[in-house]
Amino acid sequence: MDGEEAPPGALNLADYAPAGARTVDCFRRIRKIGEGTYGEVFEAMDIITGERAALKKIKLDDGKEGFPRQILREIKLLKKLDHENIIRLKEIVVSPGTAHGAGGSDDYMYRGDIYMVFEYMDHDLKKVLHHSTPSQVKYYMEQLLKGLHYCHVNNVLHRDIKGANLLISGGGKLLKLADFGLARPFTRDGSFTNHVITLWYRPPELLLGATNYAEAVDIWSVGCIFAEFLLRKPLFPGRTEQEQLSKIFELCGFPNEENWPGVSKLPLYKTIRPTTPTKRRLRDIFHNFDSHAVDLIDRMLILNPTERISAHDALCAAYFITKM
Amino acid sequence: LYSAASIAELIGGEAEYSPRSDYPDRLRSRSIDPAARAESVSWILKVQEYNGFLPLTAYLAVNYMDRFLSLRHLPEGQGWAMQLLAVACLSLAAKMEETLVPSLLDLQVECSRYVFEPRTICRMEFLILTALNWRLRSVTPFTFIDFFACKHISNAMVQNANSDIQ
């Protein structure tokens, strides 16, 4: 490259302060409520309206990729998705206009932090996952599937469904899907990375190295959460990917070309060995529960992703039609 | 995806994602340098081809650039400013649409006169994002093509279904 470098600091962002843009000073910080990949999450109050909000701070680390792609994608998806069971991104604000550095040549208007402002939710599902009544469970599951169905209709995979990413409000009446940091739009023939979804809720196709997957990855996670609601403990608490697969096969049986055509061609299939017993015995551990609930879990946790129930069909299942 | 959107919504949306209405006049009267803009557009197209980007990516980059120019003034007589704007707009568009995005230095391989540091580009991206009020999902001609293609396919499916019944 024979180009010359742009003069450092020549771009004075102060000249370009976004007209009328709100800054984080419009909010009073109440407490820190969490820590994400890109920064902290705070509970805050809008000073003007008094409305509560959750502020997710995004750190710009001046890395090689510039503005983080994951954040751009999350913002893009959240602006596209508009549903009562999906967290609403209210606005994006910037940190206030304090100069950077101590009068060096590198001053610029903003420290470089931005904040995504979300509607405030009381807590996450993790908190209630191990002590909810059967009617609450049905209520949560229905909303989770409605939100997920809406994502899937709009060609968005969530890819990280777990208790901490499902938020509850309104005295336990409202559930919303949150944290779309790993979510992405999909196409039928798209190829993705397989390092997504927290281990316990990760479906067998990802653990076996599939890079061509679809909506069914989210349904597996939903099935794991549903089962955890009933059992009041995690269904497959693996510590390593290997152990995760063993725990799945122990209950769901060992995959073969008969129950899952194409499975032997997945990259990591050859590395796994059948454990005993290899027969599916998932239903056995739920012998004291509502049979409609167990039927639905059974159809969500089918090894072969193409046979796994869709969010739409799950919402039509007998479980949701029968009243408690 | 477009089943819920009506053509009226798309047309309304397109205007919201366009440069201000006085932008063509400002280009003609040279209060915005049309030659520098043309040079940036051809640079964007060159890099699009070199990296095998989608046509939509190039279109979005130019859309972001025009919208930014119609809202903000770049420092005058500074060629690097327009080039920096083009690099940052293309980088944003690639991050929105492409599966594989080259590093910011690789993105500038085809760029002869100036090479910008990633942190400088990051700041420019941030400026653009705030100027455009974070509205990057522009309604483009591609949106309309998808819309009509979907309509056509679903009409054809209804017709096929009808002829099956008969």
Image (tube, rainbow, N blue to C red):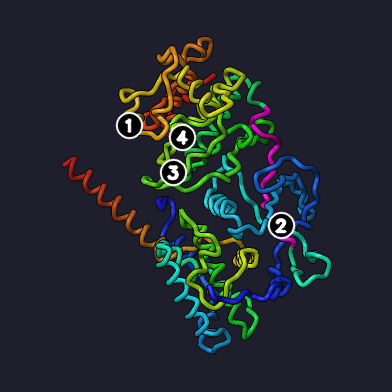
Q: Chain of mark 3?
A: A
* Letter of the chain that mark 2 sits on in the rendering: A
First reached walking from the N terminus: tag 2 or tag 4: 2
Lower sequence index among marks 3 and 4? 3
Give percent across and percent down for residue A171: 69, 32
Residue indicated by mark 2 = A113
Instruction: Classify residue A40 as left or right of residue A289.
Output: right
What crowding class fits label 3: few (fewer than 14 Cα within 10 Å), some (14-19), or many (20 or more)?
Answer: few
Mark 3 and mark 2 residues within 8 Å of each other at the beta carbon = no
Asked whether A118 falls inside the magenta stretch, the response is yes
**Magenta span:** A111-127
Picture quadrant of residue A310 = top left
Q: Which mark is residue A153?
A: 3
Real-space Cα separation, disc 1 to disc 2, in angstroms: 47 Å
Q: Position of residue B52 (x, y in %)?
A: 40, 62
The kind of residue on which mark 4 rests is: Leu
Which residue bears the numbered disc 1? A262
Q: Earlier in the sequence, mark 3 or mark 2?
A: 2
Where residue A206 is drawn, which disc sits there?
Answer: 4
